[in-house]
Amino acid sequence: MKLYLSSIGIPAPEGLTSLLGKSFNKTTVALIPNAKDYYSKRAWDFTINSRIEYMKSLGLNIEVVDLKDYTEESALKNKLSNYDLIWAMGGNTFVLRYEMQRSHFDEIIQDLLNQGVVYGGDSAGALVAGLSINGIEAADEPGFAEKVINNGMGIVPFSILPHTDNSEFLEVVPIFEELHQDEEIIELNDSQAVIFENGTHRIIDGQVPPQF
């Protein structure tokens, strides 16, 4: 099982290429944009296109896979099986978590990880990989989601908290820590990522990427 989780984008590209076992220009990526579903169409298009350009600038081969387009679990699984890396963007964590459950993404990703596909995500995309997102309502509006789901996908046995050095996020940290005091929390600042591989994890430092 291989994951690359960060606060913003890909702060340490060499860590991701090592995890993938190939260069970015040989890597196919399914970009999951659904954390931005509460945006207006104009804002959604602008933000997603900006992220596509950023990832292309690193050499990655990107295709957007919108979970809203899928009602059949088998169709989504067949689609996602075509990629080396599945990357979930940041945005509203509750919106993303709802759409992942509705589309059965949270079940599909477990099988794909076992097959060697890498999961990556930043901000909301990192949060949902953990045990719980409870407490992130201090930063994200739960009411934007069709249904509020507080549990994460549980891919890793931790709760993930990004942006711990971001001045706009500092008030969230003690709230999240209090609600997750019985769990181990992996805290990431905006220039860090955590890599999970072969039952171990390590935090790596890099440069703060552009924000989206």
Image: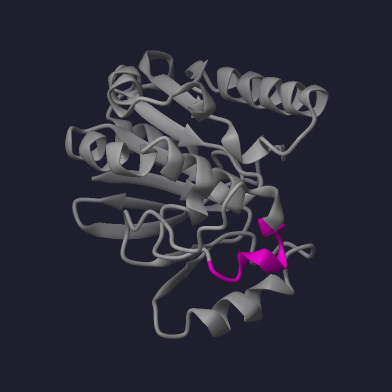
Q: Which residue is drawn at 78% across and 65% down?
A: 167
Q: Which residue is drawn at 72% across and 40% down?
A: 211
Q: Is residue 110 shown in magenta? A: no
Which x, y percent locates residue 83? 34, 21
Which quarter of the picture shows residue 115?
Answer: top left
Left or right: 83 with respect to 124? left
Which quarter of the picture shows residue 8?
Answer: top right
Which x, y percent locates residue 87? 47, 34
- Work out which quarter of the rendered image holds the C terminus and state it: top right
Q: Which of 81 and 141 is in front in this view?
A: 141
Q: Nearer the viewer, residue 174 or 179?
A: 179
- Work out which quarter of the rendered image holds the N terminus and state it: top left
Which x, y percent locates residue 5? 46, 49
Q: Is residue 11 visible to us here?
A: yes
Relative to 53, does residue 107 appear above or below in the rendering?
below
Left or right: 36 with respect to 96? right
Magenta region, residue range: 134-142
